[in-house]
Image (cartoon, grey):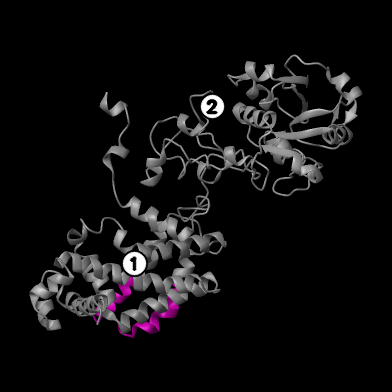
């Protein structure tokens, strides 16, 4: 750390948003410490130096511009269209964070007007967003919402002037190199092809019938737990693939199959290999995995 | 001859015996006699009759699996692929009848023999996997109706197995290949999307 660290100046700007990422960030247990090391020039909820009107009037420089929500050129904040507001603040920012799936790829808000709403660098998989030429200084934190610790990780890395390795969508590899499937407590059920019939149980894999997208979704939800205790799959609901540019998919709670065979294979696994292994695993009945974990032994 | 080649030649002879005599009538001494090797030496290659039987079904499933894989990877339409699978299956039934006979009369008829070493579909995985891929791709292409895999699998393979069985019993008035066209058409009509 620098011997006399200056506080990072952060602007948190909202596009078209449900505030989900703002609220998610409030759940970071280390938020207090983090806020002591940064200066919030503007934030929609937390105490900050500038009101929205003052921000739009001053258009100040920043170390990190965090953009939450989807981008639409004509969407206004304090009387200024996003086309000018985002571009001006982005040009004056050293680093930019696309916070959440809407800012990253368009997300849920894009569904309203797919032709005009996008993320700031990416529009779904295409890098055709307004900040595409500045992509090198953008970090993508996709997720609906993004995990608060993902954001504090990136802020810390910037504060400590450490390099952040990113993937093709500029998501930090440290956070998105994993699949949601990694660390899922149901992996043994996945291995032996034991399905879960419904939500909310401790047993069974949610991939075969409940639409779980953990095996092809990048994210560390089962490594960096939510509220430090759980994740969707741990709680018994399927991963909906919210960190991917394809989010939101249709029929989120159903696994699309062709002739009983999942239409999507776990990431990078050839269909032939998967089917051979799955067929073999299904041939066995493992009594322990077919029983309730707790209730049957009560 | 390498040990592996020797193994295959033993399996070829054993296959003939098993498919003609059935599993229980065929003994390790009768197999050894047919090959012209001592029973003791035969056990150097296969530790039991059950292990030999298991290796045979794996061998046959691989033959059928390789054939269907070639068809799956060809650019043919789903309807043409059905024709090709029917043709391939009947061709093998004619040229190497012992393979299909073994499948029907030994593997499927003596499940107790295979229960421990070939649970479920493990030993026929090479063959079943290719059919899964055929069906999955047919539905994905919009050519076949989406349904439970086993409903379609039973219709397709049950039909073909039944015809080869009738042929083996010499009940069919005409040659097996003369049914190919109508059978392929029936299968396609039964499975196609509406």
| Residue labelled with disc 2 | A226
Q: Vertically, is A277 above or below B28? A: above
Q: Residue at x 61, y 43 (%)?
A: A250
Which residues fall within the magenta stretch?
A: B160-186
Query: Does the magenta stretch mainly form a helix, a strand or a loop?
Result: helix
Crowding near pointer 2: few (<14 within 10 Å), some, many (20+)? some
The stretch drawn in magenta includes residue B184: yes
Instruction: Give the label, 2 or 1, closer to the camera.
Output: 2
- Looking at the rendering, in which quadrant would you find the N terminus of chain A? top right
Q: Vertically, is A100 above or below B56? A: above
Residue A100: image quadrant is: top right
Residue A282 visible from this viewpoint: yes
Q: Secondary structure at mark 2?
A: loop
Residue A177 x %, y %? 56, 43
| Residue labelled with disc 1 | B158
The stretch drawn in magenta includes residue A76: no
- Looking at the rendering, in which quadrant would you find the C terminus of chain A? top left
Residue A22 x %, y %? 69, 24
User: Is residue B157 found left or right of A263 in the rendered image?
Assistant: left
Q: Secondary structure at mark 1?
A: helix
Q: Vertically, is A81 above or below A216? A: above
Residue B74 x %, y %? 52, 74
Q: Nearer the viewer, residue A243 or A46?
A: A46
Residue B86 x %, y %? 41, 75
Q: In this view, which residue lies farthest toward the front?
A: A3
- What mark, if any, has residue A238 been given in the picture? none
Q: CA distance from mark 2 to mark 1?
A: 50 Å
Crowding near pointer 1: few (<14 within 10 Å), some, many (20+)? few
């Amino acid at each position: 750390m620098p011997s006399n660290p200056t506080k990072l100046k952060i602007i948190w700007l909202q596009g078209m948003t449900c505030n989900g990422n703002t609220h998610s960030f409030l759940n970071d247990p280390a938020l207090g410490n983090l806020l002591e090391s940064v200066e919030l020039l503007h934030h929609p909820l937390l105490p900050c130096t500038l009101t929205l009107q003052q921000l739009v009037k001053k258009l100040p420089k920043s170390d990190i511009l965090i953009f939450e929500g989807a981008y639409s050129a004509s969407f206004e904040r304090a009387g200024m269209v996003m086309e000018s507001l985002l571009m001006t603040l982005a040009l004056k920012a050293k680093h930019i964070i696309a916070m959440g799936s809407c800012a990253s790829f368009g997300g849920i808000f894009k569904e309203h007007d797919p032709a005009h709403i996008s993320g700031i660098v990416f529009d779904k998989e295409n890098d055709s967003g307004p900040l595409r030429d500045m992509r090198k200084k953008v970090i993508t934190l996709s997720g609906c919402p993004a995990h608060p610790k993902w954001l504090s990780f990136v802020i810390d890395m910037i504060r400590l002037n450490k390099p952040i390795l990113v993937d093709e969508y500029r998501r930090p590899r440290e956070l998105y190199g994993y699949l949601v499937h990694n660390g899922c407590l149901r992996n043994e059920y996945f291995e032996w092809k034991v399905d879960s019939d419904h939500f909310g149980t401790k047993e069974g894999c949610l991939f075969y019938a409940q639409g779980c997208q953990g095996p092809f979704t990048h994210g560390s939800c089962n490594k960096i737990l939510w509220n430090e205790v759980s994740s969707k799959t741990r709680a018994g609901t399927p991963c909906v693939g919210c960190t991917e540019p394809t989010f939101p998919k249709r029929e989120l709670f159903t696994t699309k199959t062709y002739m009983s065979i999942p239409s999507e294979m776990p990431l990078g696994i050839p269909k032939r290999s998967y089917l051979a292994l799955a067929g073999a695993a299904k041939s066995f009945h493992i009594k322990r995995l077919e029983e309730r974990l707790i209730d049957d032994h009560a | 001859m390498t040990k592996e080649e020797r193994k295959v030649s033993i399996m070829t002879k054993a296959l003939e015996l098993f498919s003609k005599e059935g599993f229980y009538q065929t003994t390790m001494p009768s197999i050894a006699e047919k090959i012209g090797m001592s029973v003791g030496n035969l056990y150097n290659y296969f530790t039991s009759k059950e292990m030999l039987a298991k290796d045979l079904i794996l061998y046959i499933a691989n033959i059928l699996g390789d054939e269907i894989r070639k068809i799956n990877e060809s650019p043919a339409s789903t309807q043409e692929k059905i024709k090709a699978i029917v043709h391939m299956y009947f061709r093998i039934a004619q040229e190497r009848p012992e393979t299909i006979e073994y499948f029907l009369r030994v593997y499927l008829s003596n499940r107790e023999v295979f229960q421990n070493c070939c649970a479920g579909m493990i030993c026929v995985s090479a063959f079943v996997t290719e059919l899964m891929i055929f069906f999955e791709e047919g539905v994905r292409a919009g050519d076949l109706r989406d349904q439970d895999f086993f409903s379609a699998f039973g219709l397709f393979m049950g039909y073909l197995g039944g015809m080869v069985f009738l042929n083996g019993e010499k009940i069919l008035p005409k040659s097996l290949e003369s049914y190919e066209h109508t059978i392929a058409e029936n299968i396609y009509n039964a499975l196609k999307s509406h």
